[in-house]
Amino acid sequence: MDTLPTQFYEQPTAIVARELIGKTLVRRHQNRWLGGIIVETEAYLGCNDLASHSHRGITTANGAMFEAAGTIYVYPIHNHYCFNVVTEHSGVGCAVLIRAVEPIWGMSEMMTRRRINHSRQLMRGPGCLCQALDINRTHNKQTLKKNRTFRIAENPDVQPTITSTKRIGISRDMNLPLRYIWDGNWYVSGRASDHQTKPTRPPQPTTHP
């Protein structure tokens, strides 16, 4: 699978958030690739977006958001971490939060780390995703270009149906439809009513070459 080029992340943030649905996210850990298919994202648009970490300007904590497109921004929340990819251009402060991934590779290792024995909750939500992939603040400010640990790649085998909704867990700019989900996918977080098609359990684990 071809790794996404830097130019992909230089697009408008909402476009990147939407087009990341169906892409593959993997993380190399102890000589194994762990991860799956992105099924849920949220776009954060910079200084004019009151829900964005960047709306008050650059700080030590959010500095990664103002780096070049394709930079990883990891921030802590409630004893967990959230994984974001910076978009557009340096100094803008835009990023896409990866909210959920359909797990495919390294299931047993991720289940051990999450201390669960079922797949649905494994990477369903940004904190769960980072725990499953062992992502933390040390990964902040890495770039995806030629990265030996993280890879986001094309996945031509899937054709997701994408729906947009309001973002989750914010108190400002709540009505902007900047959350993108794979409609009907079992592994998307949040409410079933967010989907146009009722989420159903896959008949068997998804496999890809």
Image (tube, grey):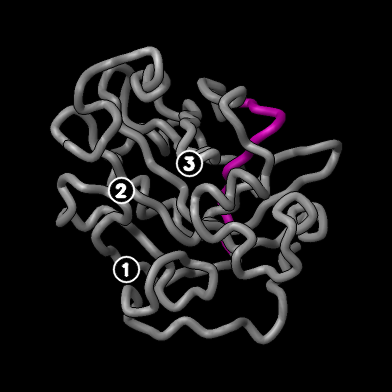
Residue 37 shows in this picture: yes
Mark 3 nearby-residue class (10 Å; few <14, some 14–19, many ≥20): few
Marks 2, 3: nearer the viewer: 3
- Horizontal side of 177 relative to 110 (left or right) equals left
Query: Is residue 86 positioned above or below 66 on the image?
Result: below
Q: Is 112 colored magenta in this rendering?
A: no
Distance Cα–Cα, label 1 vs label 2: 13 Å
Q: Earlier in the sequence, mark 1 or mark 2?
A: 2
Name the residue tied to disc 3: 78
The location of residue 97, given as percent across then percent down, is 41, 44
Q: Are marks 2 and 3 in contact (CB under 8 Å)?
A: no
Name the residue tied to disc 2: 15
Marks 1, 3: nearer the viewer: 3
Q: Are marks 1 and 2 in contact (CB under 8 Å)?
A: no
Name the residue tied to disc 1: 163
Distance Cα–Cα, label 1 vs label 3: 28 Å
